[in-house]
């Protein structure tokens, strides 16, 4: 009978430590345990360490895009899918209080939810938070994915989403991968066009928020909407 691989005993001890004192585990140990559930017959410690080195921490790993993850030696499709599942799980945890009838009361809250929802993409993405008449989150919808510098969006697409969902209002959110949250001239123009369309169709355009990894810009806070 063949002997079990060396990592079987190591993994068992990690699980015992997790139950006894979870805070004592290093980040790579937590990550290797997570990865082991997607690839149980492999030693996941080297992959966990490589991921942390590549992306700078657990947050970076969970926000990384599929192509970048697959560049890491030892990481396969099943583990990438598992990491995406964890990200979606955490995004829904962030949204849970809002879905329990909490009002989206500040641009900062919306920015935090948006980061959890679509992460730090290398390309610009435009999303819409659909809210009811009391500004409570109904759902998130992606309306555009573009390049590193723009995500083309059409007012009719945003309004069609709001009308189909019977939403009371919308909050526009998009990211600036370059790290500068200040709006471009194109951002200003598309915001004005969508706001005009909303007035015509009785859909409230509450804000347009531009997010980066560490900051955000709110059109509503700056008096631009």
Image (tube, grey):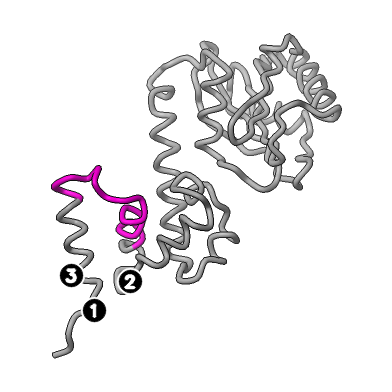
Closer to the camera in the image, 220 or 61: 61
Circle 1 residues within 10 Å: few <14, some 14–19, many ≥20: few
Sequence-wise, which precedes: disc 2 or disc 1?
1
Label 3 environment density (alpha carbons within 10 Å; few <14, some 14–19, many ≥20): few
Q: CA distance from mark 2 to mark 3?
A: 11 Å
Q: Residue at coordinates 73% horizontally, 9% vertically from top-left?
A: 223
Question: Residue 88 occupies which quadrant of the picture?
Answer: top left
Point out the tag, 2 or 3, that comes first from the N-terminus: 3
In the image: residue 101, left or right of residue 216: left
Kind of element beneath mark 3: helix
Q: Is residue 148 magenta?
A: no
Q: Which mark is residue 174?
A: none
- Secondary structure of the residue carrying tag 2 is loop
Residue 185 in the figure: left or right of residue 81:
right
Q: Most prominent secondary structure in the magenta stretch?
A: helix
Residue sitting at x 52%, y 13%? 105
27 within the magenta span: yes
Q: Tell me the magenta residue range.
A: 18-35
The residue carrying pointer 2 sits among few (fewer than 14), some (14 to 19) or many (20 or more) residues within 10 Å by Cα, namely: many
Furthest residue toward bottom: 1
Label 1 sits on a secondary structure element that is loop
Residue annotated with mark 2:
43
Identify the residue position indicated by label 3 in the image.
Answer: 9
- Between marks 2 and 1, how big is the CA–CA gap? 9 Å
Q: Which residue in the protein does label 1 denote?
A: 5
Q: Position of residue 14 (x, y in %)?
A: 21, 58
Give the vertical position of 113 relative to 64 (above or below): above
């Amino acid at each position: 009978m063949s002997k079990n691989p060396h990592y079987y005993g190591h993994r068992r001890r990690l699980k015992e430590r997790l139950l006894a004192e979870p805070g004592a585990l290093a980040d790579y140990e937590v990550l290797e345990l997570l990865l082991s559930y997607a690839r149980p017959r492999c030693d996941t410690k080297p992959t966990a360490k490589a991921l942390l080195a590549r992306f700078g921490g657990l947050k970076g790993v969970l926000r990384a895009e599929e192509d970048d993850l697959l560049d890491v030696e030892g990481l396969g499709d099943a583990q990438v899918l598992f990491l995406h599942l964890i990200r979606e799980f955490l995004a829904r945890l962030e949204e849970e209080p809002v879905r329990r009838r909490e009002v989206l009361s500040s641009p900062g809250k919306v920015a935090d939810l948006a980061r959890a929802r679509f992460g730090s993409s290398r390309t610009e993405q435009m999303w819409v938070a659909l809210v009811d008449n009391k500004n409570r989150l109904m759902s998130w919808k992606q309306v555009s994915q573009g390049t590193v510098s723009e995500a083309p969006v059409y007012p009719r697409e945003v309004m069609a989403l709001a009308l189909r969902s019977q939403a009371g209002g919308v909050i526009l959110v998009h990211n600036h991968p370059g790290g500068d949250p200040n709006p471009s001239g194109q951002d200003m123009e598309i915001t004005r066009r969508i706001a005009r369309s909303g007035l015509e169709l009785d859909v409230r355009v509450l804000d347009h928020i531009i997010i980066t990894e560490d900051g955000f810009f709110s059109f509503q806070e700056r008096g631009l909407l």
